[in-house]
Image: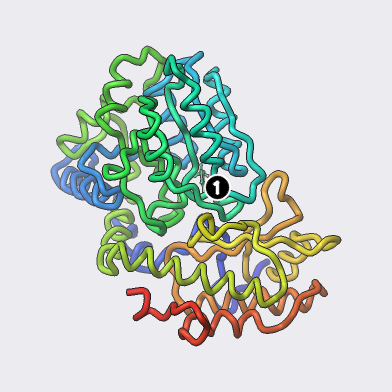
């Protein structure tokens, strides 16, 4: 039996800590999803999610994980044999590619080393070379949760405009939305894919698509079989605040509360808070004499920090020491990073002292697991948070 003598520290980069307010908001009797009270909730959360995606376009909310929202993006707009351009940024890009393969898309996968955002120069080269516009979609992962590297969707949009390529731009922002700046309309995104359990601070169970007019037009002419994921029926039902099938009613109460919390803080302040915590976490890693997976400052994720273990030390053994001694879960290394890295989530419902507790747990864990490091990481992070170190990162400075 696991005994918790206080809060468990859930510092994996998703699912993230669910605020008590959100848990309480879900604690409601189930209601008639075809009745008037539900319709009010339905219309409310759709409008709320349009504000979070910063879009005037339809947002589809599925009772699904993020993976379902990936599948929805594909089956609504693409058919087998369609050519798509994807970029290998890490495990989530690799999984999305695997899903696309099952739908027999013809995938051009731009290689990557799992330590950077997408290779933009290579994307530009391949799009420019595609004179016949065979590529139907460019699909990228915004915040690559397996590496802590960001691909900025607006960078990709600029490239597509520069080479005048008409492909759809699809973005997985499952762990970006609600923690990193995101502009579905202003950045010209055609399909945004998201999930409930990362920056939105909800339990797992909701998937999202935000869809442009161009994506909707593509879905109208797309002959791929689909039913559960079909945008058209859902958008039609959503006009009256309902769904063609039973929605995840209690998670929608949670969504209403989660977005209310994001908006009380102000989305821009939410993004600044994540950036500040990312800077403090990286300062700690540097002081320990360890290396972050992400190398370029343009790529550093504000939502999580992935840390390389020194040669000969197993990251999962270290994570086990931290869990057993301090009741803290750190993210494991995925796929080719298995055993080689650990990930510190600083995403969602989070504040300065939670970060300090997290970093103290890591520093004590490094000591107990006899991982070679220097002391002083926690101190370095405090200096960032108080503005004592060079980067002025106090709350006032960021605001
Ligand atoms: C979590 C995550 C997913 C997958 O979401 P599930 O809810 O586990 O299906 C996809 N992409 C990214 C970037 C993620 O962080």
Q: Please indicate, yes or no, whether residue 228 appears anywhere in the rendered image.
A: no
Q: Residue at x 28, y 33 (%)?
A: 212
Question: Residue 255 at what x, y percent from top left?
Answer: 32, 54
Number of numbered callouts drawn: 1
Structural crowding at the residue carrying mark 1, measured as other residues with C-alpha within 10 Å and reported as few (<14), some (14–19) or many (≥20):
many
Q: Quadrant of residue 61?
A: top left
Classify residue 140 as left or right of residue 332: left
Residue 342: image x %, image y %?
A: 67, 60
Q: Residue at x 53, y 38 (%)?
A: 121
Colouring convention used in this rendered image of the protein: rainbow
Query: Would you say 128 lies left or right of 113 here?
Result: left
- The answer to whether any part of residue 377 appears in the image is yes
Percent position of residue 133, x then y? 42, 18
Q: Give the residue at mark 1.
A: 117
Q: Secondary structure at mark 1?
A: loop
Identify the residue at image location x=24%, y=29%: 213
- Residue 209 on image: x %, y %: 35, 38
Residue 141 lies, with reference to residue 104, above or below; the image says: below
Q: Nearer the viewer, residue 169 or 260?
A: 169
Q: Is residue 96 above or below residue 375?
A: above
Q: Is residue 84 above or below residue 61?
A: above
Pick the front one: 35 or 150: 150
Quarter occupied by the N terminus: bottom right
- Locate the C terminus and report the quarter of the image it occupies: bottom left
């Amino acid at each position: 039996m696991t005994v918790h003598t206080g809060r468990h520290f859930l510092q994996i980069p998703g699912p993230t800590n669910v605020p008590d307010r959100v848990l309480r908001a879900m604690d409601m009797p189930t209601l008639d999803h075809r009745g008037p009270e539900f319709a009010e909730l339905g219309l409310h959360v759709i409008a709320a999610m349009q504000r979070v995606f910063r879009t005037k376009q339809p947002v589809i909310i599925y009772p699904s994980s993020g993976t379902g929202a990936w599948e929805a993006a594909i089956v609504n707009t693409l058919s087998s044999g369609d050519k798509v351009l994807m970029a290998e940024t890490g495990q989530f890009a690799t999984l999305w590619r695997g899903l696309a393969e099952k739908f027999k898309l013809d995938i051009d996968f731009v290689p990557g080393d799992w330590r950077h955002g997408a290779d933009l120069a290579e994307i530009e080269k391949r799009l420019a070379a595609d004179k016949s516009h065979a590529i139907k979609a460019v699909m990228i992962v915004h915040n690559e949760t397996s590496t802590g590297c960001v691909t900025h969707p607006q960078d990709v949009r600029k490239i597509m405009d520069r080479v005048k390529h008409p492909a759809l731009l699809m973005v997985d922002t499952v762990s970006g939305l609600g923690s990193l700046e995101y502009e579905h309309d202003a950045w010209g995104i055609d399909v945004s894919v998201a999930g409930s359990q990362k920056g939105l601070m909800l339990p797992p169970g909701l998937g999202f698509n935000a869809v442009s007019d161009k994506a909707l037009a593509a879905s109208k002419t797309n002959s791929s079989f689909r039913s559960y994921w079909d945008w058209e029926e859902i958008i039609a039902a959503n006009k009256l605040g309902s769904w063609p099938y039973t929605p995840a009613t209690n998670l929608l109460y949670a969504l209403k509360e989660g977005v209310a919390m994001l908006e009380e803080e102000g989305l821009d302040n939410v993004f600044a808070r994540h950036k500040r915590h990312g800077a403090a976490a990286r300062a700690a890693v540097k002081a320990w004499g360890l290396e972050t997976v992400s190398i370029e400052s343009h790529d550093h994720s504000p939502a999580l920090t992935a840390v390389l273990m020194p040669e000969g030390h197993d990251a999962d053994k270290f994570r086990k020491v931290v869990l057993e001694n301090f009741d803290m879960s750190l993210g494991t290394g995925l796929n080719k990073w298995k055993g080689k890295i650990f990930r510190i989530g600083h995403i969602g419902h989070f504040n300065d002292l939670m970060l300090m507790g997290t970093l103290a747990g890591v520093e004590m864990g490094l000591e107990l697991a006899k991982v070679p490091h220097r002391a002083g990481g926690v101190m370095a992070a405090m200096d960032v948070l108080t503005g004592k170190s060079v980067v002025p990162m106090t709350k006032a400075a960021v605001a």
